[in-house]
Amino acid sequence: MRILYDSKQLQFKDPFGTLIPNQECTLRIHIPSTVQATQVTCVFNHADGSHAMNMTMGYQFKRGAYDIFNGKFHFDQVGLYYYFFYITTRTGGFRLFKQGDDTNMEAGDCWQLSCIPADFHTPDWSKGATIYQIFPDRFNKSGKCDLSTKLEPYTVHENWNEEVQWAPNADGNILNNDFYGGNFKGITEKMDYIASFGTTILYLNPISKSFSNHRYDTGDYKTPDPMLGTEADFTAMCNAAHKQGIRVILDGVYSHTGSDSLYFDRYRSFGGNGAYWNQNSPYFSWYQFYEWPSKYHSWWDFDTLPTVNKMDPSFVDYIITGEDSVVAHWLRAGADGFRLDVADELPNEFLVLLKKRLRELKPDALLMGEVWEDASCKCAYGAHRRYFVDGELDSVMNYPFRDAIVNFLRERDDGSNLRSTVMAIAENYPPEVLLSNMNLLSSHDSPRILTALIDDFDGSREEKARRHLSRSQYNIAVDRLLMASFLQFTLPGSPSIYYADEAGMEGYRDPFNRRTFPWGRENTELQNHYRRLGQMRRDQVALRLGDIQFFQAAEQKIGFTRSYGDKQLRVYLNRSWDNWDIPTGHVLLGHKLHTVAPNWISLSPMGFCITEEL
């Protein structure tokens, strides 16, 4: 018999998940009577390892072969805490730690618990949203733009369907300066298409004037890239989105600028008043030079991306606090929030200032962060990140869900790891953050989901350019994507469609995940499937805002409920090679299911459905 404690179950910890200051929490632990425990002490430490407090748990009652101990506590201040138990017996004592979802004596991890600000709230429109992400140069082109101020050199593909430029130039450099001409007007023309998936948030990769096609090498924060159009074109696009009930969020790239920029100006494209040429430049203090001008700190040693001193007063004023700061400029132009590139590299103080300024300018603006791990306990560059305990971010890019879904559908997991991952995030994140998380399957930084679901090839760029899924591989990947997207749209959070995933686009990492949208060559089966998923989320508040509880996560079968008020939905997915008989309910959406007996239906292999009680 083992000592029983599971922080994800209310019988052991009440309430579930995070706490706010002075909120009472009850812990219960079930100890076999044979242990002869006399007292239990719960030891709480701060994230830095220093001691926070002890809580004594007394004997409550006996249930079967177990003695139940309980105790109540609260935290006075926000923070990230870790805890373990010390169990005193008649003959001595021992420590109890966590091992997976179980317990283990004298070895293992501590349990985690966050205390978050009482006034921490995310925008209502971000909870349970449906996101559509666009890499602006590759989505859709309409008309021509004035390229007289476009940073040079660059090339424009004559054919929209040409392969992306993947090879280095004669000097061995990859410039990322080939363009297709996707623009704001092109996005505006396709707003009905974007809205057809139930989209409520449109997320754009960087739009500021830049040398490269990815535009993470910012040239001028406050000016749109001429290839995309004018600021008036941007505002018109935002207005078109808002008429469809869609909010617009932009990529905020504040860790570094481009070397070819107004601020650094290595190539004198902006008149030679940048930090590279002028130590009296208003931007000189933004950068760290080892030997001016040619040796300077750059992002991951890419000399085209000089990093900035994020807390430099001039930089903070320019980006955040100034009357016409960068964030103020784009919010006034029509944006509704920002996704922060490499949020781990932005100091906590910077994020606090940014969040405060956003809320002053637009009380329901959204601030999302690029974080690849569990953001509640992230430690980066020697510092614990306080994304949630200080209310810095409203949401993050939910890569843990993506990885768990891929592993499950690739048969690397029987379902137990998927459940553990989902419930760990549900437990560790503030409830409103959980609902606002960007639940992605693909992004501009990851392989296309169709490819990821079947092929892990990671060869050279030349090999990737020639390599494509075979017809049989493609068909298998589509079957898996039907399941993956079903999970994505039924789990807590905000499902995100990376442009053209819904059209059946494949591709490895950058630049092959950034090909142009295949207009006229779409996979209509997938498109219709995504539209049904989007409609289902629009119609079912329990999918957008409901709690989650798993009732099946083993043998390649996943089952969970989404509950909101008196409404409960049951979600089933069968990854196994056997039929799965389930109770009949009112089927809201189903795939590969049939009736087998009164009050019973059966899910075939790769089948899924969502039901509500009759």
Image: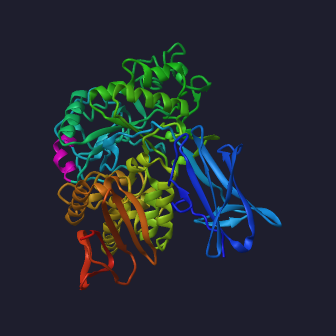
- Is residue 191 located in the magenta-colored stretch of the structure? yes
| 20, 323: nearer the viewer | 20
Residue furthest right in the image: 91
- The correct choice, above or below, for 231 with respect to 559 in the image is above
Where on the picture, by quarter, is residue 156? top left
| 529, 418: nearer the viewer | 418
Q: Image quadrant for the N terminus? A: bottom right
- The correct choice, above or below, for 520 with respect to 285 in the image is below
Estimate the x, y position of residue 506 in percent, counting from the top left: 33, 61
Region in magenta: 185-196
Estimate the x, y position of residue 459 in percent, counting from the top left: 48, 61
Q: Residue at the spot x=25%, y=49% of the render?
A: 199
Residue 447 showing in the rendered view: yes
Q: Is residue 530 left or right of residue 263?
A: left
Q: Residue at the spot x=48%, y=56% of the render?
A: 400
| 82, 485: nearer the viewer | 82
Q: Is residue 24 left or right of residue 228?
A: right
Q: Residue at the spot x=53%, y=28% of the render?
A: 310
Magenta part, dominant SS: helix
- The correct choice, above or below, for 517 with respect to 313 in the image is below
Residue 467 showing in the rendered view: no
